[in-house]
Amino acid sequence: QVQLVESGGGLVQGGGSLRLSCAASGRTLSGFTMAWFRQAPGKEREFVAFITRSGVIADYTDSVKGRFTITRDNAKNTVYLQMNSLKPEDTAVYYCAADPSPTRLLGRRRDTTAYDYWGQGTQVTVSS
């Protein structure tokens, strides 16, 4: 069992930056694929980014590619999402997720159903 706690969200103007953190407890994160998802009110939860256990491979949804960067520090048991050039359409609750399965198709890493553990979410609001 692993517990995930997100932090770093807030209110920022368009064009600004935020860095989200996801801290884990209960187990080390080294054995987990990690991901960030986001959900706006009344909308489905949307894939943002994932990173493999070693950090060798990372992938992003097209709308954030080139603006967001996912990283992990297994020694600190923490995953990060650096968000630059933020836009109003980035406004959402951002969730950290963990998947203990060692092998999945890369496409499956974009699905909420691939992840067993979720944080409580942190609100990101981007003004015009």
Image (cartoon, helix red, strand yellow):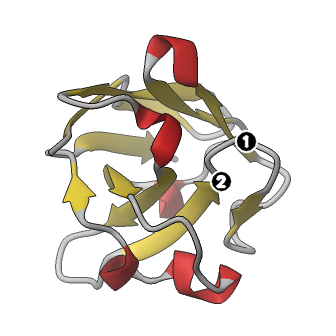
Q: Which mark is residue 31?
A: none
Q: Is residue 124 above or below residue 49?
A: above
Q: Position of residue 108 (x, y in %)?
A: 54, 86
Q: Which structural element holds mark 1? A: loop
The dot on residue 55 is 1
Q: Circle 2 sits in a helix, a strand or a loop, which is it?
A: loop
Q: Dividing the picture into quarters, in which one does residue 19 lie?
A: top right
**Mark 2 neighbour density, 10 Å: few (under 14) some (14–19) many (20 or more):** many
Does residue 104 sit above or below 98 in this rendering?
Answer: below
Q: Position of 42 compared to 96: left or right?
A: left
Indicate the quadrant containing the N terminus: top left, top right, bottom left or bottom right: top left
Can you see residue 92?
no
**Which residue is the site of mark 2?**
52
Question: Where does residue 86 sit, x and y in percent of width and height?
Answer: 62, 44
Amino acid at circle 2: Thr
Q: Residue, x 74% and y 63% (percent of image)?
A: 59
Mark 2 and mark 1 in contact? Answer it, CB < 8 Å: yes
Residue at the (48%, 45%) spot, across then down: 31
Q: Is residue 69 visible?
A: yes
Which residue is drawn at the image coordinates 44% and 68% (left, top)?
Answer: 101
Front position in the image: 94 or 1: 1
